Image (cartoon, rainbow, N blue to C red):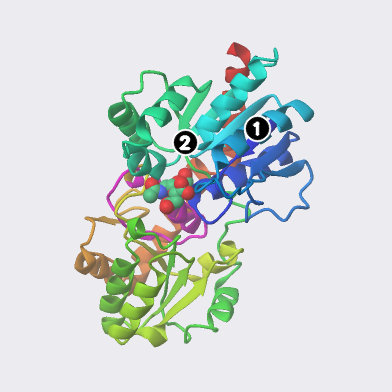
Amino acid sequence: MRIGITCYPTYGGSGVVATELGIELAALGHEVHFISYSQPFRLSGREEGIFYHEVPVSNYPLFEFPPYDLALASRMAEVAEYYDLDLLHVHYAIPHSVSALLARQLLAARGRRLPFVTTLHGTDITLVGLDRSYLPITRHAIQESDGVTSISNYLRDATFEKFEITRPIETITNFVNCDVYEPAKDAAHREEARKRWAKCGEPVLIHLSNFRPVKRVTDAIKTFARITREVPAQFLLVGDGPDRSVAEWLAHDLGIHTRVHFLGKQERVNELLPLADLLLMPSEMESFGLAALEAMACKVPAIATRVGGVPELIDDGVTGLLYNVGDVDAMAQGALDLLRDRARLETMRDTARRTAQKRFCANLVVPQYVKFYEHVLSKA
Ligand code: GMT
């Protein structure tokens, strides 16, 4: 198939999923065309079978707000025509599904078919989508898509309920390439790589996000402060975003800044995750929790919050630990109990990796997308 993919190309789970999906589809022999305002950050630009088409947005003095969604719709239609695309797959409903709907109409008027699939990721429904100014148009574009998928049952049901959607939505979960996200070769390699931050035997915790308020990064810092008071440890924070400076301030204020390492945006998180003992994911909301899945594949269980689709990924007490939002004391206690009971932690680490392999590996999930595309094409 020839597939056009549109996503937010910068840091964020939906962009990661879209990019990884494009890479996996190209590896299966499909032709993938990314259409976006910049090249998705996980693409090198040299992958075989993957093409990138930039969306130019003109900024005339008259435009207080340059109309990206219109430029995107035009570019989608152009690319579909010139490269003979079979379908478009847009990630994150706002505004991508609306642009795809316009592109489909544009081509239909010229007698050409261009079905599109919308994948719902989370805040497009739970936060942004519920804003009255976006709701009616987003609802319409979801309803009119040729196929809709959601990354968890939680998000699927929330979309039915909050958007009053009446069309079917199929759950296709987030996935991870278990050959790229894998544990360190052995204990010696892991210890060697951890040396940069931790003394021999010192626990390492990690947090990975885009530092948006929904991630509650300051809860991660508070939890770590309670942990390191009892078991001296090191904390790696990967990513960047609006709450980074308040998190840095808090680390200083709590006097733990020498143990807290802000690494910023990193391209190869698969090399950092295996170094940790535990991931802290204290989010206010996660429709799935891709960061926790990537960690699990590297044998790193998460101390996380019982929100949204997280319980569909993490089996509490078996592949990680789940707590109420904001309960930093309980999260710290849970982490401490695990760090002090190495046998229990090791069992949890093994089970986390096995679960990622058995249920969420790219080679299991990507074929579900291919089947879904085939189904959409057969009825369009
Ligand atoms: O988590 C974010 O803030 C980024 C956001 C996105 O759409 O880029 O992530 C959402 O999509 C991820 C990939 O499907 C999910 O794993 C995340 O749980 C989801 N985030 C939220 O629901 C807050």
Instruction: Give the residue drawn at x 46%, y 26%.
Output: 141
Within the image, what quadrant is residue 292 found in?
Answer: bottom left
Please name which of the two marks, 2 or 1, marks the residue nearer to the observer: 1
Which residue is painted at 57% across and 26% down in the image? Answer: 102
Q: Seen in the image, is 94 located left or right of residue 345?
A: right
Q: Secondary structure at mark 2?
A: loop
Q: Position of residue 162 (x, y in %)?
A: 29, 31
Q: Amino acid at mark 2?
A: Ala
Q: Front-most of 214 and 110?
A: 110
Q: Place residue 340 in its image quadrant.
A: bottom left
Looking at the picture, how far across and down is residue 256, in whole percent? 34, 85
**First of labels 2, 1 by sequence position:** 1
Residue 345: assigned label? none
Quadrant location of residue 189?
A: bottom right
Cα separation, mark 2 vs mark 1, equals: 17 Å
The answer to whether one can see residue 289 in this image is: no
Q: Is residue 350 left or right of residue 102?
A: left
Magenta part of the protein: which range? 288-310
Q: Which residue is mark 1?
A: 74
Is residue 308 magenta-colored?
Answer: yes
Residue that numbered label 2 is attached to = 93
